Amino acid sequence: MKQFLLPLVTLALVGVVLQGRAQVEYVDPAMGGQGFLLEPTRPTVSLPNSMVRVYPVRKDQLDGQIHSFPLTILSHRLGELFWLMPASGTPEAAAWDRPAAYDQEVETPYYYSARFDESLIRAEFTPTEHCGYFRFTFPAGKPTVLLANRRGGDFSGASDGSVSGSERIVGEGEMSPGVMHAFVYGEFSAPVTIQASGSGDKKRLTVAATDGQKVLEFRYGISFISVEQAKKNLQREIPAWDFAKIKEAARDRWNTVLGQIQVEGGTPEQKRVFYTSLYRCYERMVNISEDGKYYSGFDHQVHQDTRPFYVDNWLWDTYRALEPLQTLLNPEMEADKLQSFVRMYEQSGWMPTFAVLWGNHECMTGNPIAPWVADAWAKGVTNFDLATAYAGIRKNSLEGTWLPWRRGAKCSLDDFLNEHGYMPALQPGETESVARVHPRERRQAISVTEAQSYDDWCTAQIAQNLGNAADRQLFLKRAADYKNVFRQDQGHAWPKDADGKWIEPFEPGWSGGQGGRDYTTENNGYTYDWDVQHDLQGLFELMGGRAQAEAKLDQLFREGLGRSKYDFWFKFPDASGLVGQFSMGNEPSLHIPYIYNYLGAPWKTQKRVRMLLDTWFTDTTLGMPGDEDGGGISSFVVFSMMGFYPVTPGVPIYNLASPVFDCITIQLHNGKTLKVICRNNSKDNKYIQSVRLNGKNLNQVWFCHADIANGGTLELEMGNTPNRSLGVEPSTFPPSYLNFDPMTLVH
């Protein structure tokens, strides 16, 4: 036995070391960087929710060449601002368009480094909130840095060796016309000569230091107000040449943020997945306030404001899990973000849905600001102007268009939706007659109707909070509209034409053209059978009752594609992370594994969520099954690995699944602590045997936000066999009903 003693002791010590590691050391920004079919993740270097975000520009994590470094990005996945690359000696003209092979890459949230193969130049980067700091090492002693703007503007060097310039940002659509600019001011750590080139307003700068200089540093400030403000930002945040100090401060900031959640148990791989996912939940929204003022792309004015102004939120992706996670962790920041949306409505006349840097990005479907506001308010986030937020939400619903990838005033199809309670679909082969319909995105008739139904249910909750009984009844009536596109004799959501006739033929797994867009959004009808977050019990009745609904949900994870994967993914590339016809890689699926809790079979949620986490979210470059969407999917991972999830934003409860860790400790904003303790937990022991919350035994698999808002302890006893008596009675089901009043769950 003695021969095994040393390895056992060594393993024990390794466990202690791993447990004691700083949370940021578990983060691997390369995770998910390959991508299955869709956009890969990017190894973004930034401070949490901050304006300057940098990554190497390349196709994906497997791309062996870096094309450039931005000085910041435009908005999540919408492109970069400015262009930088190091070079050795006098560059050829082709150097501006030639990517460079690299090696020895180091990727962390707070620091990036890579060495280029041919020149052996090492590039390093670390951020502050409004600034960036590059350090270049030139073995040949011929230091050169190439700089440019990408979209036009100005760029020039000064006699003191500083550089400054701007880049043009053009808005889109009727909500966000006009042009704004990003500005930069930068300095070098040694005397340099600057040569300008380029044509028109697209400028290139070649910056060279004296031969023999081995290290050259570049620090810069970004602003959306002016070059002068960019210089002020730099002088405030990087006043001295000290790369190590800035790097250490950035590391400390990430450790503080990630350390808000401490996990014990689980494997090192699971910790890497968890903390990498948590890091991605801080990529947006970003605070673009500068010295108490900000430039708004919603009215193209500079505003003074004592509160920070946040942009870059794709609400269709984020209202489901990312914003509820931040509501739990950082409610004060959530209030500031919500008030930012209020400001955007006041400035533009419309409540945005995809609020990015230049204004509203006309993308996706629905009125997803409604569930975010309803959920935050129900969970005690009240430091924002609810009445004005409601005015914007109401206007979007009743006066705006519900058409996919369109925003602004309503059209004839919206009048039909308002009168008849569903978006009318075209019959196969019928020519589109409404010019406002997006030529590629089509009508998405089923999913638009379902989004309107749920979003208006959330709007009804806000109306109730404001004491507006008439509006509450109006929007509750509209909240039942999803029933108009469910065909009971077929057991599926089903499109209907303007004459009230069901579309024929219709195949739930295949019809609707590219991405199903005639009828659905990015996924096929199997996903949208379940896209009724606010009235699951009503949905079960349409399906024939609980037993039939449970069998149907079982079958979703088993259903064949009916054709080859090649053919299926050619038509439905967004339906990634497939398990049967369930798509793990797209946001409308996130709540679906938790629906078993509403059917009296919570053990199936526990089993299924563990399986999905183990299968699709790994610490590899393939560790993200679909478009990550800046926290849209990662927040599902964070919640689910902790063992609870907000199925219905607007109802302030969390559904239980199966935590992967033995203990999770969350430091709440008010200094209180929420602790989740899982006894006898393991890979096989994934089934909850008993639930105890704040010392009280529960026979249910959900708990209220109010029960843990001031801290608490959730104790779960785990086992390898399902407890089929836990949470099986209707009285123990999580509340999610059409006429349910969420305020009954608010203390």
Image: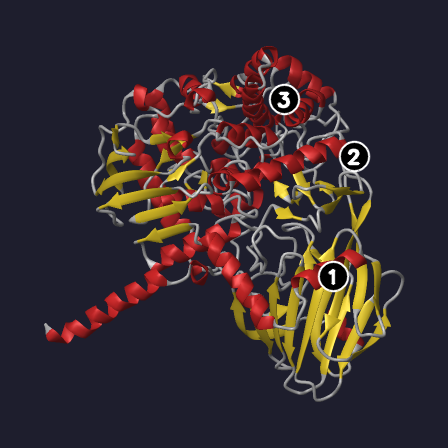
Q: Position of residue 265 (x, y in %)?
A: 30, 54
Q: Is residue 610 left or right of residue 415?
A: left
Residue at label 3? 423
Q: Where does label 1 land, which residue?
A: 82
Mark 2–mark 3 distance (CA, rounded to whole Å)? 22 Å
Tally the marks.
3
* Residue 692 at x, y percent in the picture: 26, 34
Q: Which mark is residue 174?
A: 2
> Could you tell me the amino acid type at mark 3?
Met
Which residue is painted at 53% across and 16% down in the image? 480
Q: Earlier in the sequence, mark 2 or mark 3?
A: 2
Q: Locate the N terminus and report the quarter of the image it occupies.
A: bottom left
Foreground mark, 1 or 2, reads 1
Give coordinates of residue 671: x percent, y percent.
Answer: 43, 43
Left or right placement of residue 738 versus residue 401 in this view: left
Residue drawn at 54 percent across, 50 percent down: 282
Residue 83 to residue 525: above or below: below
State the image quarter where residue 296 is shown: top right
Name the secondary structure under disc 3: loop
Q: Looking at the image, is mark 1 or mark 3 earlier in the sequence?
A: 1
Give the quadrant of residue 156.
bottom right
